Amino acid sequence: MSIATIDPSTGQLLKSFDEMTDRQVEEVLARAAVGFDTLRTTTFADRARWMTAAADLLEVERDDVARMMTTEMGKTYASAKAEVTKCAMGCRYYAAHAERFLADEPADAAAIGAVQAYSRYHPMGPVLAVMPWNFPLWQVLRFAAPALMAGNVGLLKHASNVPQTALYLDELFRRAGFPAGAFQALMIESSAVERVLADPRVRAATLTGSEGAGRSVAAIAGQHIKKTVLELGGSDPFVVMPSADVERAAEVAAVARCQNNGQSCIAAKRFIVHTEVFDAFTDAFVARMSALRMGDPMAEETDIGPLATERGRAEVEEQVQDAVRQGARVLCGGQRPDRAGWWYPPTVVTELTPAMRMYAEEVFGPVAALHRVSSYDEAIELANGTNFGLGSNAWTRDPAEQERFATDLDAGMVFINGMTTSYPELPFGGVGNSGYGRELSAQGIREFCNLKAVWVGEGGAAGPGAGAHSE
């Protein structure tokens, strides 16, 4: 059974679930259509009250939900609790700001011969969300909170290794007061996504996941002329310049690389360090990576738990071995421990060449690629020398360099002297093979809205020059 909870720390199957039948999927889609007809007519005040209630539930149930996530995908219990708290914050943010973000936007009516002219946002309908396991609650909530507050309804196809989290989310919004059908989980395999997305009742899709999954969903949606938002992989650069606080940069670098056991699209992955501070940074960085404590993810003292899946651990191991075979040097880690479960230690690899897989591929585990550069221009060339463009980090205390990095780094997000993360207040997304569209902020709630132009003339006219050539 592929829809199952398997404890990554032991490899033990804990619980399995049946895939939905065609009839059950049809019932979900029918409820979604009815739920949208209901939710779209509710007020922002009603939705805000329900969304706040969802936040309350998350906060009350935080410890149990965090324990469930740790059991399903191996993140540390401490980081799982922080994820639940962040989800509650996201719910409250959109409860407070959705009405303002979607308010009518007036235009210059006189300039276009109107008595009144404005733009209005309307919800699109049921949106299919294909979500990953690495942040099994936050990835979903950062879509669901703005989507529901806009009046859309959500259909969740979650990763097959976090089914209990999917079922919790299936109930959360209903318990909070949202109308029946407003948010539902589809317990289906990836092979069933095409049929759901092709259904005319589903109006759009959002996916967070691999490049391959993104291409597949985008292609299916394109065939049916449906809107998509894609947040795909990343190989984020972490650039350290001579003026940087090297000790602080190294401290943050270890956290940035190993957050969520190294399984984050926006984790720093390629560490690009100016030669003037390369040795000092390397010594501090390797020391901090080596000091991270790998162990029981439920234990308070643990810094890093197991990788989420056996296949994921095998992929990371193969990427490191490929680099070593071709002459790369491992400064720490690099050997999986002899124990049950899917463990891999914090690892730093240097002396990489373009022939090595690690040079261009995303490594989805606690493995850092360390590069030496001799100038700003070389740093930018290497940082941008990838098909990805999600997040990026630059460490410099030079104001002119800070401004140049903000402009020159080819990414959806640039964080200077700090670790890339997501905030409800800032748009989240990438360029290139990292996807398109934005989540969070005002842009995130507008992605799945129809922006409708409204022109009102005197006496009810359709508008000046209306007719065959009015466009």
Image (cartoon, grey):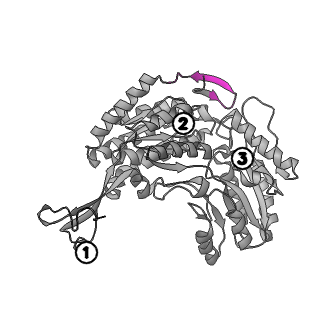
Badge 1 element:
helix
Labelled pair 3, 2 in contact (Cβ < 8 Å): no
Residue 10 among magenta residues: yes
The type of residue carrying mark 3 is: Pro
Residue 380 at x, y percent in the picture: 69, 68
- Mark 1 crowd level (few <14, some 14–19, many ≥20, 10 Å Cα): few
Assign a secondary structure to mark 3.
Answer: loop
Spatial separation of the CA atoms under disc 3 and disc 2: 21 Å
Q: For mark 2, does the 10 Å Cα neighbourhood hold few (<14), some (14 to 19), or many (20 or more) residues? A: many
| Left or right placement of residue 390 versus residue 316 in this view | left
The crowd level at tag 3 (other Cα within 10 Å; few <14, some 14-19, many 20+) is: many
Which label's residue is closer to the chain start, 3 or 2? 2
What percent of the width, then of the height, locates residue 377?
71, 73
Q: Which mark lies nearer to you, 2 or 1?
A: 1
- Considering only vertical position in the picture, is 96 above or below 196? below
- The residue under label 3 is 366
| Residue beneath disc 1 | 111
CB within 8 Å, label 1 to label 3: no
Q: Say which quarter of the image contains residue 238.
A: bottom right
Nearer the observer, 416 or 212: 212
Q: Residue furthest front?
A: 468
Q: Which mark is residue 66?
A: 2
Q: Position of residue 21 (x, y in %)?
A: 47, 22
